[in-house]
Amino acid sequence: MKYYPAFLDVNGRDCLVVGGGAVGTRKVRTLLECGARVTVISTAFSPELEELSAAGRVMLKSGPYGARDLEGKFLVIGATDDEELNRRVSEDAARRNMPCNIADRPEACSFILPAIVTRGDLVIAISTSGKSPAFAKYLRRRLQKEFGPEYARFLEIMGAVRRRLLAAEHAPEAHKPLFEALIDGGLVDLIREGEEDKIDALLEKILGPGFRLDALQS
């Protein structure tokens, strides 16, 4: 199986998780981080899900799953320990051409969930095409050490620079060499070391007067 890599926009979309245990809770957590509206169907729910429900962040539906629960949903994730139920969720979603993930059962999925490393807006996805989730987790641990919080700050700065250049009606094709020069100039290393004066100097050298951290943050 060769998967087509993609990042889904679930912000503001209705998503369904079938299963309220530890695995389902992890799936819910990631969906919420991406802005999804989440409904969870289960006969029992983890304490974390109960807390999220009390805070108004998820909708919990106590009881058995039925195909009608898929109506109006963008995608569904099956996260139960009932193989027959997971199979029904997969088949019901397939009949609706709905994206479906069944935890730890890639053969029943229309999409799989990679191991991820997140640093602010930086998201690194790791997949072994279902061959070895353990190795994907191993790679995630290695990448977590290599990519620290400085990369989140780096993207905040790059995003602010991009917005300012676009506001000044710079041609987008002219941006690429500027961004490459910031990267090659060691901006990430300067952020990691907290060298704000040197960051300002690099920004002004490449982008011109006025491109300083305080101005970009305002």
Image (cartoon, rainbow, N blue to C red):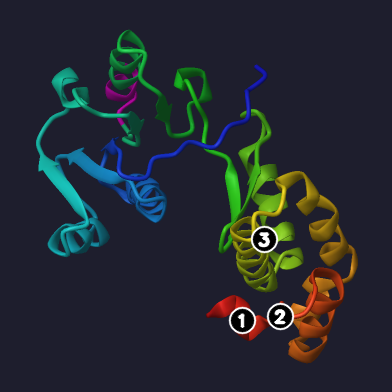
Q: Residue 49's quadrant in the figure? A: bottom left
| Amino acid carrying mark 1 in the image | Ala
> Are the two marked residues, 1 and 2, in contact with CB atoms closer than 8 angstroms?
yes
Q: Position of residue 62 (x, y in %)?
A: 10, 41
Instruction: Determine the CA span between mark 1 and mark 3.
Output: 13 Å
Q: Position of residue 175 (x, y in %)?
A: 76, 53
Which segment did they paint magenta? 82-87
In the displayed structure image, the side of residue 44 where residue 83 appears, left or right: right
- The residue under label 1 is 215
| Amino acid carrying mark 2 in the image | Gly
- The residue under label 2 is 210
Instruction: Determine the CA span between mark 2 and mark 3.
Output: 12 Å
Of the numbered discs 1 and 2, the one sitting upstream in the chain is 2
Q: Determine whether 187 is above or below 60 in the image.
A: below
The local secondary structure at tag 1 comes to helix
Give the class, few, some or many, for how many residues have Cα within 10 Å of label 3's Cα (few <14, many ≥20).
some
